[in-house]
Image (tube, helix red, strand yellow):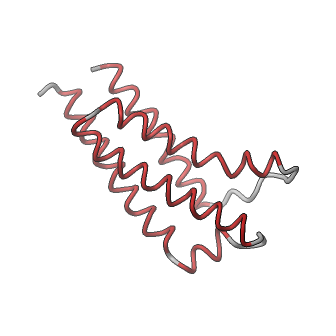
Amino acid sequence: MHTSQLIFKLLGAIHGLVGVVLLVVALDKDFQKFCFYKGEDAFVGDLHKNLALFGSSLLIACGAFGFFKPTFAVGAAWLSFLVYLLPSLADLMAGRRFGKFCKECAATFSVRVVAAAALTAVLQHG
């Protein structure tokens, strides 16, 4: 096994574990009230929550695919990033301003960007 393959699998596994943590956080009822439903109607809150759960599930899939299908792992990481951006695009299309960008949002955003960029770079290199 080459070093780049080992690094790729390690990065995939780490981001898969982070996806599990993000999923557990997103399933917390107090966090949902604070992040998804604060100042939003029920439909928009449900949309934000379900997209967050789907994005976290994609990061978990990224960790699993890292061991078997590296290109699928990169695709899952990029798709997780795009799913994260969907609520912002929906708000823009509805004529609303961007929502808040709290510490939790910044953390999940950075995890998704790092996962997509790092896995793409290692796949290109190896």
- Residue 108 higher or lower than 113, as above or below: below
Relative to the observer, which residue lies in front, 54 or 81? Answer: 54
Residue at the (41%, 49%) spot, across then down: 59
Going 38% across and 56% down the picture, which residue do you hit?
A: 18
Q: How many marks?
A: 0
Residue 77: horizontal and vertical position, in percent? 44, 40
Image position, residue 72 (x, y; %): 36, 34
Q: Is residue 66 left or right of residue 96?
A: left
The residue lying furthest to the left in this view is 1
The residue sitting at 57% across, 80% down in the picture is 30
Q: Residue furthest front?
A: 43
Vertical placement of residue 86 versus 2, above or below: below
Quadrant for residue 50, please give it.
Answer: bottom right
Farthest-out residue, right: 95
Tell me the quarter of the image containing the C terminus: top left
Give the image location of residue 54, x and y in percent. 50, 55
User: Quadrant location of residue 2?
Assistant: top left
Q: Position of residue 110 (x, y in %)?
A: 52, 46
Query: Where, quadrant-wise, is the N terminus in this rendering?
Result: top left
| Residue 61 or residue 3, whichever sits in front | 61
